[in-house]
Amino acid sequence: MPLSLIPSPSLRWSLPSSPRPSYPLPPSITRSFISYAPHQKLEILIAASTYTSPSSHPPIIFIHGGFGGAFVWIEWMTFLQQHGVTCYAISLRGHGESWNPGFWRMTWGTGLAALAQDVCCVWNEVVKREGGRLPILVGHSSGGGLAQYVLSEGLVRAEALVLCGAIPGFGGLGVHWKWFKLDPWFLFREYLHLMHPRSPLSSTALVHQAFFSPGFPRSKVAQWQHWMPEWESLRWPLGMMRPFVSFPRILENITGLGKRVSHVCIMAGSEDKLVGVKIPQRLANVFRDAVKASTETKKTDGPADFATEENETHEYHADLSHGVHFVVVKGAGHHFQNDLQQETGARQLLAFIRRLS
């Protein structure tokens, strides 16, 4: 029997008696907290622009995915702040240094609507800090699904939307099917682990297989894995299995549309074993159709009026057309903001941001 099938003693069902140390931050990034209820605080990492003069770039709110936290964005935040972009990264409840509801409440009692409250809380704080300026929302994996959800529900507005290896708004069933095919022992291991949410990621080998490219050092996977939450909301991904957003409503809450500049960017890693390239490509096409319908309805600049550009290098493929920017980071796995190709992804995000100014 493969070692990954053996019930893991590392799986936890309750919080440890003493909290683990905080994730170490570089000097240029600070940690802050927002309290919105008694004993309930949310962690925000802040990377202020290093430019001495006011930046023309909108700020960014980064939203992590399942088993992540604000820490997954540190590499990109460090890069972007050096190019005049102020960045904020949230740790949703149960992640990072944010408050933890406990195993059962987090696993089965926390869904999209609850996590959306966390995003709204941080969005309000960021808009206030930035003098009313709307941010760019950047979401990864399930956090990308959450970003689509809060815009679709009209809970927040944004200058632009960037989705990185994201659960698509038309439903994430295909993502879960890819995970089952990647890991044939998925369901059997879940049974042995009593349906613990971290069962599919209960070993370093499983985390490496699902989240990173084959060339990413296993030792670094082990270091990264140390900061993953002990458990995760199951209602979060289950709530995104089937279509869960309205794409026209998402666009209504992105303020930059109609300015002949793409305000939607879809990013993918060519070695992403969970989302792949075809699902983000389809998501980009769905957004392009929605942009076309929106511009025709409002009689603003249509897809033919948007800039069109296609670039291919050994590091990435970028296709800017019909109002949507689609980028594939070559060689990168699901967590391409942490993988070996992290700088390539960061540079492509910066190129998108600069087009907005």
Image (cartoon, rainbow, N blue to C red):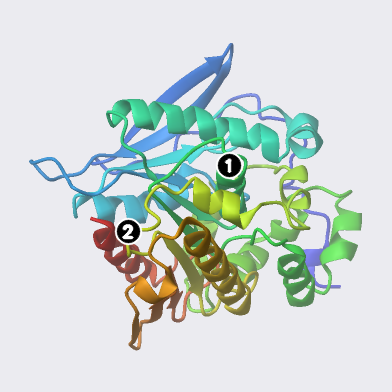
Above or below residue 125? Residue 340 is below
> Residue 336 versus residue 328: which sits nearer the camera?
328
Which residue position is annotated with label 1? 150
Q: Is residue 153 visible?
A: yes
Q: Earlier in the sequence, mark 2 or mark 1?
A: 1
Q: Disc 2 and disc 1: Cα gap in Å? A: 23 Å
Q: Position of residue 265 (x, y in %)?
A: 44, 64
As shown in the figure, which amino acid type bears the numbered disc 1?
A: Val
Residue type of the residue flagged with mark 2: Lys
Point out the image quarter for the N terminus.
Answer: bottom right
Query: Position of 81 compared to 230: left or right?
Result: left
Identify the residue at horizontal 15%, vertical 44% (top origin).
Answer: 50
Q: Disc 2 marks which residue?
A: 259
Instruction: Assess disc 1: are there few (<14), some (14-19) or many (≥20) residues with their C-alpha within 10 Å of its C-alpha.
Output: many
Callout 2 environment at 10 Å: few (<14), some (14 to 19), or many (20+)? Answer: some
**Which is in the foreground here, disc 2 or disc 1?**
2
Q: Secondary structure at mark 2?
A: loop
